[in-house]
Image (cartoon, helix red, strand yellow):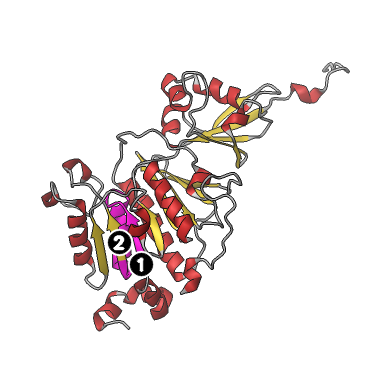
Amino acid sequence: MFSARELERYKRQMMLFGEEGQERLKNAHIFIAGAGGLGSPISIYLAVAGVGTITIVDMDVVDQSNLNRQILHSDRDVGRKKIASAEEKLRELNPDITVNAIDVKIEESNVADLIGKADGIVDAMDNYPTRYLLNDVAIAKEIPLFHGGIRGFYGQATTIIPGITPCLKCIFPKAPPKEVFPVVGVTPGIIGTIQANEVIKYLLDSGELLTNRLFIWDGMEAHAEELCVERNPACEACSGMTPTKTPARKKK
Amino acid sequence: MQWHDPDKNPREEEEMTVKIRFFARFRELLGTDIVTEVAPGTMFTHLITTTARKNPEGYAAIFDDKGTFHEFVILMKNGKRIEIADAAETPVADGDEIAVFPPVAGG
């Protein structure tokens, strides 16, 4: 049930999907890997939409050079742990949700436990090795992975439903080299918002997800397009996998 | 009055063009929607090599110093994935649309 404050807070979106839809958001637990450029808009929009439990994980400290894009953090947060300012900001935005902010490096040894019983994983990482760990857990737990990546004015996003759509390794089998990437804040703003939008649709079980499609954004041309992507039958991560359980969102 | 050589198939004289689409970093360095004429029998790798050579930085972004695609590069022809290992033997044909892109990694 919702408090009077919640009913008022969510009034304009319940015009879209009713109290039942809002209940779905409230009952959901979403795991966000990263509190940086992508993690900022993702967590902010999921928090204000009323996703009931948000776990957000990051190991970094806020650096002045983060502030052109990482809008979870403010100038006064420089030198603080990212998860401290993330938690504070998200609680300020919406005190009616639960925020678990965890200061840890996501590794093979802890990733499955960190994700726990979350209903979905949002990829807000800045490197492929960690993304592949998220991909493996998404496959093992049969929960969706909402992928996003950015560089400069360019971005990409896709929604992965293990066993049904290509997984991250089907699409990108090899990691590109690590680099200090150039970026302007609007790019993760755009891609992160698309990822958050995907999460909301998934939880509401409505609309068309960005599945089997790689969304590609070119901010310089103000042009978006998509490439069809397919499962790789020889994929080292998901080949042979058929969805044996009902997809997570149908369990509700 | 035009002469036609009866031994020559007139279709062979037609231009064969393909469109190359680069994305993200590759696009910054090499542009995109490059419509280029190709000879019959041109292979995927050869086409991209020739096109990328116009900018050494663009070439280095896509190929290693042995002239092989970097292992992370994604290749597509008409929306279908082409494996790097097969690209050297994959011919391109008139009207093909080629896509070459890197995984975008930042977050």
Disc 1: CA contacts within 10 A as few (<14), some (14-19) or many (>=20): many
Q: Is residue A90 left or right of residue B63?
A: left
Task: Give the image location of residue B78, x and y in percent.
Answer: 62, 39
Q: Is residue B56 magenta?
A: no
Residue depicted at x 66% and y 29%: B90
Task: Give the image location of residue A88, x and y in percent.
Answer: 18, 61
Q: CA distance from mark 2 to mark 1?
A: 7 Å
Residue depicted at x 60% and y 42%: B79
The residue lying furthest to the left in this view is A76
Instruction: Give the residues in magenta.
Output: A30-53
Is residue A154 visible to us here?
no
Secondary structure state at the residue bearing disc 1: strand
Q: Are marks 2 and 1 in contact (CB under 8 Å)?
A: yes
Residue depicted at x 57% and y 48%: A228
Q: Is residue A33 magenta?
A: yes
Secondary structure state at the residue bearing disc 2: strand
Q: Nearer the viewer, residue B40 or A87?
A: A87
Q: Is residue A168 above or below residue B36?
A: below
Is residue A234 visible to us here?
yes
